[in-house]
Amino acid sequence: IHMVYHFGGYRLPYVRSTNGGRDWQNVRDLITDTIRFPYPMQGRIFSNRHRLYIFFIGGNGTGESPIYFLNSDDRGTNWTQPQQITDSSIFVRSIAVLKDTLVILGNFYLNNPLPRTVYSTDGGLHWSIGTGLLTTDYGDPEIALTNGWLHVVRHYPLDSGLNILHQRSPDFGNTWSVPDTVSESGGALEAHIATQPNGNLYVVWRDARPDW
């Protein structure tokens, strides 16, 4: 079990357990360069077969800090140096990993703050910016990958109230399908999406109607 978190003066703290969480090894700070990374934040960890990825925002104090990642091929014993993905970012919304495909959905530019993707199909060696924008920043979007498709779910106000919408992209966020309505309750929030290797999608959300 692997975990990263943000707390106090830690520098992208990482900790792991080799016995299912009964015991944990000592916390390790993966970022030591306080000049380049004065405020590393939003650390997120993902596993892909035998490779681990950690994504984080550099936190340079300008409000448009680059996104970086590092990876480990020996179950977290050794890590690469941070590698830069974007020139700037405002907020990372969601990340999806499938085999060597890595996709980040986020707000990357102050002059065009709508969410878009940045993606790699070779395990992070090369990155591209998606040209398609989600139509709004509303609804806490979350993404997932299946073979050939990138999916996004979020809550959004419709005539009947807040409902969960699903869109998919065949090209990692360069184009998006017309939204499908997943829920019809009129009080749906906090959508999450998960996938199976066979391509099945699962979407769960919180029903926030006042009478429930």
Image: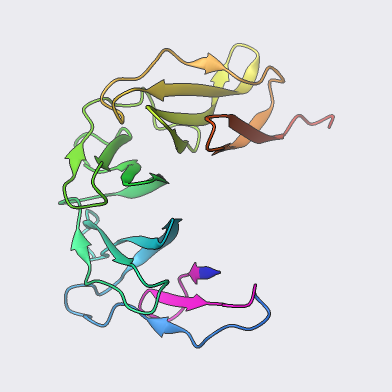
Viewer-side residue, 201 vs 92 = 201
Within the magenta stretch, is there residue 4?
A: yes
Q: Image height check: is 39 above or below 104?
A: below
* Quadrant where the image shows the N terminus: bottom right
Q: Is 33 part of what is drawn in magenta? A: no
Q: Which residues fall within the magenta stretch?
A: 3-20
Relative side of 16 to 32, left or right = right
What residue is drawn where x is 27% and y is 65%? Answer: 59
- Quarter of the image where the C terminus is located: top right
Quadrant of the image occupied by residue 108: top left
| Magenta stretch prevailing secondary structure | loop
User: Is 74 placed above or below 94 here?
Assistant: below
> Could you tell whether 211 is left or right of 58 in the image?
right
Task: Give the residue displayed 65% in from the left and 35% down from the top.
Answer: 204
Residue name at image x 31 percent, y 69 percent = 40
Query: Looking at the image, which residue is at 68% across and 80% down?
Result: 22
| Percent coordinates x, y for residue 151 in the rendering | 45, 29
Residue 135, image x, y percentages: 36, 22
Nearest the eye: 104 or 18: 18
Tell me: 162 left or right of 64.
Answer: right
